[in-house]
Amino acid sequence: MHFQFRRLAGLSVLLLLLTANSLTAQVALYAQYKGEGRLVRQVHHLTPFVDDGAGKLVAAESRYLMNSVPEYAPVYIAIRNLKVMSRSMEMMGSGAELNKRFEFKGDFESAYPLEDVFVVLELQTEDAGKLLYVQEIGNLTPRHLKPIEMSVPLTQRIGPGRFKLHLFTRGMEVFHSEMPFGQIERSLDKQVRRRLEGVTDAEPKPYVGPTPEYPPKLKRAKTAGRAVIRLTIGATGRVQDPIIKEATDPAFGESALAAARMWRFLPRVKEGRATPATIDMPFVFNP
């Protein structure tokens, strides 16, 4: 595998000459520190920070390597209001393009408090392969939307529709709403199976899932409320047949139902076998 490292217009960027499938699995990001790769645990603005080997986080070089890891962290981040665009200006008469940029903005939300969150933006260019850009998101507070913008200067054309987001918290890649649903489901199937190994008896437990989107009209009105979803947890931990049992407003019920469909549980285990279970799952909305 060949790597070529660059620094571009104040942004941390890695140019990777990789096959198309090399970043489809969960990954960890490493940065160079004193001649060796160390796991990136934080990003301050655009600077990666790694453990120096003595438990202290120190700034590392903006030279990166991505390696596959066995699992995602059991965390889900919702990306709301995502907007992605590319911009360029053409000089009249010459056909030359100026000010080529790739831009994205979105609101990031988690069901759990998360620290040291950062994003890696992967772009597929027509001529230069894959480019990675790294930027801090910071800490996420439950049910609080945090707006993030990235504006990336480009020297290469981007292939149509070819971009991908990786989100990390404390160095571990997490699930997010822009990932293909099938990819999330296959990864969770494996992770749940691992956690059931050796278990003889256990009640079902939530494993990972998104927070419901606050209905815009009710959020503007600062209306609080709740919803209860009745669902069956299958033997794989997947949600089956969810219905709205009760809701203080129909919009809360629909939002909670959409979120519940995407949750994954550790299933009930009896005498070493995973068995279905039906539960009521409450969701609370506070503006």
Image: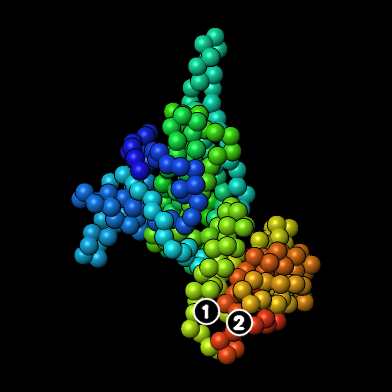
Q: Is residue 243 left or right of residue 179?
A: right
Q: Quadrant of residue 38?
A: bottom left
Q: Nearer the viewer, residue 264 or 92?
A: 264
Q: Which x, y percent locates residue 122?
A: 47, 44
Answer yes or no: is residue 107 visible. yes
Q: Secondary structure at mark 2?
A: strand
Identify the residue position indicated by label 1 in the image: 196
Q: Quadrant of residue 239?
A: bottom right
Q: Is residue 135 left or right of residue 256?
A: left
What amino acid does circle 1 point to?
Leu
Please give the label number shown on residue 165: none
Quadrant in which the C terminus is drawn? bottom right
Q: Which x, y percent locates residue 174?
A: 49, 60
**Marks 1/2: CA distance?**
8 Å
Identify the residue position indicated by label 2 in the image: 274
Q: Which x, y percent locates residue 40?
A: 34, 55
Residue at figure coordinates x 54%, y 33% from the top left: 159
Residue at figure coordinates x 38%, y 53% from the top left: 67
What amino acid does circle 2 point to?
Ala
Q: Which x, y percent locates residue 52?
A: 23, 59
